[in-house]
Image: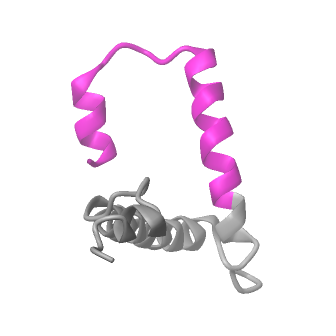
Amino acid sequence: MHLTQISKMNNKPLTPEEVQVAAEQFFPLFDIVRTRMPEGSTTEDTLKVMETVCGLAHKLRAEEEKIKFGFNKNETKTDSQSTDVG
């Protein structure tokens, strides 16, 4: 969802507290990317790379959740062996 779409959803001004919460989430992520950027990179460069990195992070999360979805995480080796006739 793009920022323009979000702003159309709610035109009510943000409170300082809401901006503070958003900044507390945003800047640690931004700093992770910024520290890995080449010397001389601009803030705009960092934001573009951050968008790509976050897109990859979402993709990796979705793949991980897809893998977990098909398995019973509570099943142990002895549970699966208990159906063996011996």
Magenta range: 1-30
The residue closer to the viewer here, 66 or 20, is 66
Where's residue 79, x and y in %? 40, 61
The residue drawn where x is 41% and y is 64% is: 61
> Most prominent secondary structure in the magenta stretch?
helix
Left or right relative to 56: residue 32: right
Where's residue 70, x and y in %? 25, 64
Q: Is 8 colored magenta in this rendering?
A: yes
Where's residue 33, x and y in %? 65, 69
Left or right relative to 4: residue 64: right
Instruction: Give the quarter of the figure containing the C terminus.
Output: bottom left
In this rendering, the answer to whether 21 lies above or below 73 is above
In this rendering, the answer to whether 16 lies above or below 26 is above
Q: Which image quadrant for residue 9?
A: top left
Question: How many labels sit on residues?
Answer: 0
The residue drawn where x is 76% and y is 72% is: 35
